[in-house]
Image (spheres, rainbow, N blue to C red):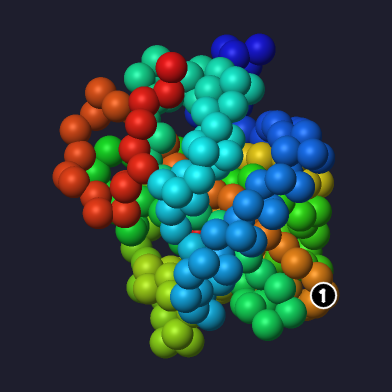
Amino acid sequence: MTAAMKEEFDRQGYFILKQLYSQDEVQALKAEAARILAKHDVDQSGVFLGLAAESELFKEAARTPGLTRALKAIIGDAVLFMNDKVVFKNASTDFGSPWHQDYSYWHGSHKFSVWIALDDATPANGCLRVLPGSHRSTVSHDGEASDNHGFIHRLNEEQIDASQVVDFEASKGDAIVFHDLLLHASYSNTSGADRWALISTYKDGTQPDPEYPWAKAAFALK
Ligand SMILES: O=C(O)CCC(=O)C(=O)O
């Protein structure tokens, strides 16, 4: 299983883990995320960084055994958790994320992120979209970024071959592990329903990197 997982990840730039978390676990994570968000001044970006930094539940979720096994198969034995964030879209924070490679934001060694559905995600409420195989090269991110929605490094929609795009329609608890060069985006949320996702980022701990101010909760997976 792990060899097949690695082979698929290397070919596509991502690997899907169906029902990585149970419905009860997802419910508890969403409630805990809501509790954390309520304690902070959260802006309209729809993103809050640093859940594991203040919650044991999120720390546990970041090292859940099924995920640890998958990450070790993909990255190797020295997996380092760096940080996590919740990306919450709802009736008032409803814009889609533009196409980008995460690598354009952090450079250094390649990182691996896990996008976890805390709600069922469909095109109507803003599911993730990926371009399989796009992790084999870096592309320049010079798309128009003046809409105040963050994502200063992005591509314009016309730069993407729409016929190759795969929508990740997810049930809550499903997850996708992806390489930081995989081009991805998400639909805007036209449904008014919540679409919350947890994104956790990892790296190969043997690889040198600059000190990232955002990696505030780093710990090694056992
Ligand atoms: O969850 C989403 O809508 C996409 C978020 C995203 O692409 C990112 O944070 O890099």
Residue 85 shows in this picture = yes
Residue 181 shows in this picture = no
Task: Name the one closer to the observer, 101 or 45.
Answer: 45
The quarter in which the N terminus is drawn is top right
Q: Residues within 10 Å of mark 1 (few under 14, many from 20)?
A: some
The quarter in which the C terminus is drawn is top left
Please determine whether, in this image, residue 165 is positioned above or below residue 7: below
In the image: residue 47, left or right of residue 144: right
In the image: residue 56, left or right of residue 216: right
Task: Name the one closer to the observer, 181 or 115.
Answer: 115
> Which residue appears at 50% of the width and 74% of the height?
42
Task: Residue 187 in the image: state x and y as whole percent.
Answer: 68, 68
> Which residue appears at 59% of the width and 50% of the height?
198
Secondary structure of the residue carrying numbered label 1: loop
In the image: residue 146, left or right of residue 4: left
Task: Residue 81 in the image: state x and y as whole percent.
Answer: 40, 35
Please determine whether, in this image, residue 81 is positioned above or below residue 85: above
> Which residue appears at 82% of the width and 75% of the height?
191
**According to the image, label 1 marks what residue?**
191
Q: Amino acid at mark 1?
A: Ser
When asked about the image quadrant of residue 173, the answer is top right
Task: Residue 15 in the image: state x and y as whole percent.
Answer: 62, 33
Please determine whether, in this image, residue 171 is positioned above or below residue 67: below
In the image: residue 46, left or right of residue 167: left
> Which residue appears at 55% of the width and 32% of the height?
60
